[in-house]
């Protein structure tokens, strides 16, 4: 029962007790995953890096430490207004300096210039995107040719989705009526 009530919060946390609890779970449970995704990216000091579904900002913090060059830029998007607010507060100093820009938007419609991003990563979120195909096309649009995108997720999350616990929001193949 509790997991079924918490499930929708995992995909799009809201300002509520369940959303607050979700933010704490995401911060604690995803820290190692986020930090390793950043390592896998091979970020250089002057790269332009994008985190999709930045949640409370743990991956943003890890990536920001590596962007020490004058051209280094960190972008983040999340379609949860609550997660966007938490991450904005966490990254406030770097946002003010212009090193970090965060957007509250859907991955399928990012306000980011074409071919402007060197590295993209996300953790535990592609299966929550409203439209996987549109999101993937949008990632391709903003990325520079020849650079990697890193997708990471916990096996437990995948198993919960397969078991139906996250049934109302979990779409491992994109829209409910199609499989990519």
Image (spheres, rainbow, N blue to C red):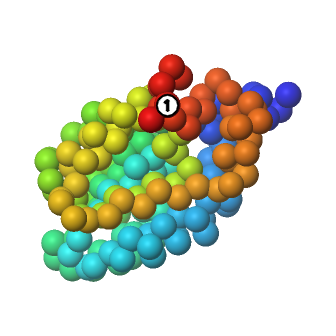
Q: Is residue 123 or residue 13 the one in the foreground? A: 123
Element at badge 1?
loop
For the C terminus, give its image quadrant.
Answer: top left
Instruction: State left or right for residue 80 relative to residue 48.
Output: right
Q: On screen, 17 above or below 148?
A: above
For the N terminus, give its image quadrant.
Answer: top right
Residue beneath the point at 51% across and 35% down:
173
Q: Which residue is mark 1?
A: 179
- Identify the image quadrant of residue 130: top left
Instruction: State left or right for residue 179 relative to residue 161.
Output: left
Q: On screen, 43 above or below 27?
A: below
Instruction: State left or right for residue 26 relative to residue 85.
Output: right
- Identify the image quadrant of residue 105: top left
Q: Residues within 10 Å of mark 1 (few under 14, many from 20)?
A: few
Residue 169 in view (yes/no): yes
Q: Residue furthest right?
A: 1
Residue beneath the point at 52% across and 45% down:
125
Q: Is residue 174 or residue 70 the one in the foreground? A: 174
Q: On screen, 135 above or below 29?
A: above
Residue beneath the point at 62% across and 47% down:
23
Total marks in image: 1
Residue beneath the point at 62% across and 59% down:
30
Q: Is residue 18 or residue 129 the one in the foreground? A: 129
Q: Residue furthest top?
A: 177
Instruction: State left or right for residue 95 relative to residue 112.
Output: right
Q: Position of residue 121 (x, y in %)?
A: 41, 59
Q: Position of residue 79 (x, y in %)?
A: 43, 35
Residue 103 in view (yes/no): no
Q: Position of residue 150 (x, y in %)?
A: 42, 61
């Amino acid at each position: 029962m509790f997991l079924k009530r918490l499930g929708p919060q995992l995909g799009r946390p809201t300002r509520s007790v369940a959303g607050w609890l979700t933010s704490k779970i995401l911060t604690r449970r995803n820290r190692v995953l986020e930090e390793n995704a950043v390592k896998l990216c091979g970020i250089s000091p002057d790269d332009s890096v994008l985190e999709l579904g930045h949640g409370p900002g743990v991956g943003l913090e890890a990536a920001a430490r590596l962007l020490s060059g004058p051209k280094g830029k960190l972008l983040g998007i999340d379609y949860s207004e609550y997660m966007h607010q938490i991450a904005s507060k966490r990254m406030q100093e770097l946002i003010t300096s212009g090193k970090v820009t965060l957007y509250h938007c859907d991955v399928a419609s990012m306000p980011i210039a074409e071919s402007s991003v060197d590295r993209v990563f996300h953790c535990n979120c592609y299966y929550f995107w409203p439209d996987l195909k549109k999101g993937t096309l949008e990632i391709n649009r903003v990325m520079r040719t020849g650079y990697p995108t890193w997708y990471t997720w916990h096996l437990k999350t995948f198993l919960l989705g397969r078991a139906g616990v996250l049934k109302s929001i979990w779409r491992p193949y994109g829209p409910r009526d199609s499989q990519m």
